[in-house]
Amino acid sequence: MDLALAAAAFGVPVSLLFLDSGVMQLLKGQESALIKQKSLTANLKALPIFGVEDLFVCQHSLSERGLQSNQLLLPAKPVEGAEIAALLEQYDQVVTL
Amino acid sequence: MLHVLRHAPQDSSRFASTLRSMGPEQGLLMIEDGVYSLLPDTSSNSALQLLPASVRLYVMEADVSARGLAIDDLPKRVKLIDYPTFVQLCTQYDKVLSW
Amino acid sequence: MSHILLVDGEAIKVDKEGFLLDLQDWSEPVAAALAEQEGIILTPAHLEIIQVLRDFYHTYQLSPAMRPLVKYVGQQLGKDKGNSLYLLGLFPGSPAKFAAKVAGLPKPDNCL
């Protein structure tokens, strides 16, 4: 997350793909303060203002967890297998976080 | 693109996600616990065999032997590699994605 | 190691670069004292930006770097203020860093 924000702050075009359990970070209504954790929700909402506007989420990972894209706190575009493969090819650098 | 898988399919969903996100002309290298994807008679092993022939499969031989898996049991299409070859593969593919 | 900033007889702890150690210590008099350390006399124009910065921090739990700061100020106060020249005029040198300091926010992580 810090990597994405830092890169964006320096004007590097950044997109994010949420995959597997990563999609859970996008779920609304997380009260991380209850377990004394920093809220990633607040940070995620900062993405557009940092210029990270292309957000993708794996449809399969959502379905696996019984989630719908309207339960997410940011508008992320749902993508399927072949689209993910094409997406990964499109970028100069791909980093797994 | 070369996908490098280093977790066992039995422990994490990375294996399934890697296969779902792979294109037909890409490579998949299994290292560390990723070599457990090749255990005989497992669904992961079958899934690998079903990949299009254009997908190149590699496995780190040292990681296979270190875990007591038999080299002879590996599917024929999987290429055994050593560390220098790992480096070579990383330079050969335009991108490396570590899972 | 902590340093002390005296404001109206109260000892406020700051780090060696002058950022507040406890963000709860912030108040307008503290802001004025922090600004003075940077050679800035606070005006309503400064306070307006400081308030926007504090809103940014409360919303996103982040101290903004320059680009997002400019964009956010633009959204909140309009385009004539949401540009780096305006911010540089108020907080010379490194606006994101000095404004964050005066607003009582942690130093931005990615601020050079």
Image (cartoon, rainbow, N blue to C red):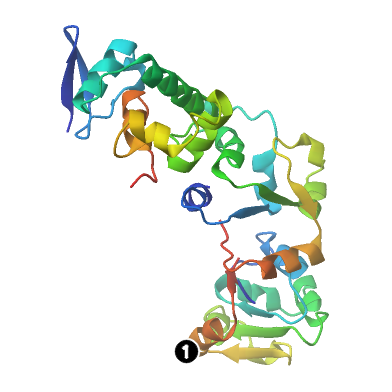
The spot of residue A46 in percent (x, y) is 57, 37
The spot of residue B3 in percent (x, y) is 63, 74
Residue A97: name its quadrant: bottom right
**Whether residue A67 is visible:** no
Q: Residue at x 73, y 50 (%)?
A: A57
Q: Residue at x 35, y 22 (%)?
A: C23
**In the rendered image, the vertical position of residue C91 relative to residue B30, given as above or below:** above
Give left or right: position of B75 versus A50.
right
As shown in the figure, which amino acid type bears the numbered disc 1? Pro
The spot of residue B75 in percent (x, y) is 73, 88
The spot of residue A68 in percent (x, y) is 82, 41
Give left or right: position of C3 versus B97.
left
Q: Residue furthest top?
A: C8
Q: Residue at x 68, y 68 (%)?
A: A90
Q: Residue furthest front?
A: C80
**In the rendered image, the vertical position of residue C1 relative to residue C30, given as above or below:** below
Protein chain holding label 1: B
Query: In terms of depth relative to the viewer, which is nearer, B17 or C20?
Result: C20
Query: In terms of depth relative to the viewer, which is nearer, B20 or A14?
Result: A14
Which residue in the protein does label 1 denote? B84
Residue B5: name its quadrant: bottom right
**Whether residue C39 is visible:** yes
Secondary structure category for the residue under label 1: helix
**In the rendered image, the vertical position of residue C82 relative to residue A2, given as above or below:** above
The N terminus of chain C sits in image quarter: top left
